[in-house]
Amino acid sequence: MKKIIFSLFVALSSVSAVQAADANAGKEKSGACSACHGPTGVSGSPMFPNIAGQNDAYIIKQLKDFKSGARTDAMMAPMAANLSDADMADLAAHFSSLPSANEQAAASSSADTSTGAAPATAPAAGNVEIVSSTPAAAIYAGNVAAGKNKSAACAACHGADGNSLVPMYPSLAGQSANYIAKQLADFKSGNRNDPIMAGMVAGLTQEDMNDLAAYFAVQNTKAGTGESNVSGHKLYLGGDAAKGITACIACHGVSGKGMKQAGFPSLTGQSKDYLKKQLASFRDGSRGNDNNGIMRNIAIKLSDADIEAVSQYITSLK
């Protein structure tokens, strides 16, 4: 009898959470999910499930189980670790409101047939990237030419074209514009701490940040020139299940180019010194502007040897 009452209590709690959920808030929180499950809840990879149109109570239960450890997955555990009940309810409300994979496919097929539209072509070299796979398809918010004019102060540390020659500073060339703009805003607000950058961004407006982000985003990234590392290769591609370390490839891709729509940065072309510093900062908590604490949850499980190895491997990515 007690078990029945408890089960009813859990069920009622789930219903209450669903009723209080905010689908719009869930959409805002879903960026990190799109790397694996797609921006519309339909995964582009057969190893990750489609969650568009899924029952919201089921989504909430799975997220809670990943967080508690009742359901184990090296990738989902750190993703769910810092989610509150409200976050889970909001995400569930968002994804459950989306058309299912079959419905999206049917709608796409119908649209192609009715319009006879030719497939989209890639933007010409040097143009800003056009993000066409989201409902809000648009060019970068910033102005590339204006960003170039404003970038002079950045060149000393990050290079005139965004490829830094100083190991302690990151390269910005080819980085996601959204990611760059977010980091600048975080430096200005104090969500990311750095005494040099705090002074640099103090006078920047949001327009300035967008312009700079657009300029550096369209520059060519230099391929990594470092030597590979066997242990780092294993961590990057496969993680470490025994330690609960998620593979880097899940968010940053095989070649380290990242996933722009999900806010996961490109790592290609970064120096080992810079990579080591960021991993160490995530591990000790001195850097904490990662979405949902994803990097902190992973880095805290990395040893010094792990950080050395994976940083060395990343410098070899082309």
Image: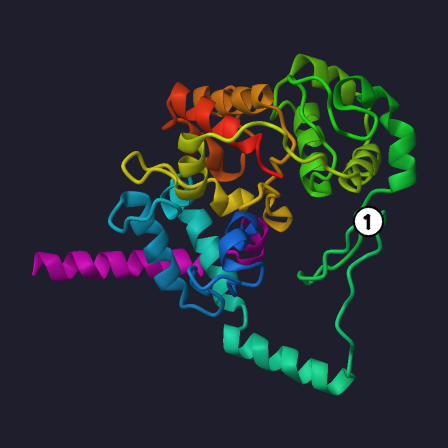
Q: Residue at x 87, y 35 (%)?
A: 147
Left or right relative to 292: residue 244: left
In the image, 199 versus 164, the foreground residue is 164
Q: In this orientation, does residue 78 appear?
A: yes
Which residues are the magenta region?
1-29
Density class for disc 1 (Cα within 10 Å; few <14, some 14-19, many ≥20) is many
Between 298 and 33, the residue placed more toward the observer is: 298
Front residue (pair 272, 100): 272
Residue 38: x and y, percent? 55, 59
Place of residue 196 in the rendered image (x, y in percent of width and height, measured from the top left): 71, 14
Residue sticking out furthest to the front? 227
Where is residue 255 drawn, in percent x and y?
Answer: 58, 44
**Which quadrant of the rendered structure holds the C terminus?**
top right
Tell me if residue 21 can be seen.
no
Residue at image position (40%, 68%) is 55
Q: Is 23 above or below relative to 289?
A: below
Q: Is residue 27 magenta?
A: yes
Q: Secondary structure at mark 1?
A: loop
Residue 6: x %, y % from top left: 17, 56
Please tell me whether the stretch drawn in magenta is mainly helix, strand or loop. Answer: helix
Q: Disc 1 designates what residue?
A: 128
